[in-house]
Amino acid sequence: MKDAKVIGIGSPFGNDILGWQVIEQLKRYSALSALYPEQIDLIEVDRPGINLIHILQEARLIILIDAILDPDKHGEIIRLNKAQLIQNQHKLSSHNLDVASAIALAEKLQLLPKNVFIFGLGINPELADPIDAETIHKLSNAVVHELVTYFSQLTTV
């Protein structure tokens, strides 16, 4: 079992590539080099649907990265915990079985760890703004901060 899985969800189309871009940047972060791949899995998945439930298993911390359909928060970095993710199912993903539904089902089946978060970027589908390198960098830094905080808590317990 890994301590953490960071899962970039996406597709090669438009802003949906966000999760993949963040994973690629995380693989190059020196702050994670001591932890990856021994304690952290960095995973890219293409519209996983129900298969996400299988990917979510066997880790103590899950961080999902995805574009989040939320016109009111277009361009903003969003962080949701497991409960918030399940509550906001209607706003998340346009994949077959959306991310929030997969999380809700995995939670009902008691397959999730306590620590599940999604990091994303608010997307308004009516605006075709490409995601710039600075935004990818900010989102990657937010994920690194979450990982560093999690691992520092493990060493102080």
Image: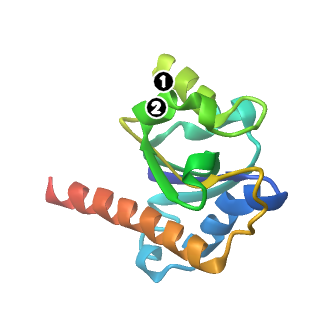
Q: Position of residue 60 (x, y in %)?
A: 40, 43
Q: Residue furthest bottom?
A: 30
x 50%, y 59%: residue: 77
Whether tag 2 and tag 1 are in contact, CB under 8 A, the answer is: yes
Q: Give, as a three-letter code, the residue at label 2.
A: Leu
Query: Where is residue 136, by image quadrant?
Result: bottom right
Q: Going from the N terminus, do you reach mark 2 or mark 1 first?
A: 1
Rendered image coloring scheme: rainbow
Indicate whether 82 appears above or below 146.
above
* x 75%, y 55%: residue: 16
For the view shown, which residue lies furthest in the left direction? 157
- SS class, disc 1: helix
Q: Callout 1: 10 Å neighbours few (<14), some, many (20+)?
A: some
Q: Which label sits on residue 89?
A: none
Please give the label number shown on residue 107: 1
Query: In the image, what residue type sits under mark 1?
Result: Glu
Q: Quadrant of residue 90?
A: top right
- Relative placement, left or right, of 21 versus 29 is right
Residue farthest right in this picture: 13
Q: Is residue 148 above or below residue 29?
A: above
Q: Does residue 98 sit above or below 22 in this rendering? A: above
Residue ID for mark 2: 112
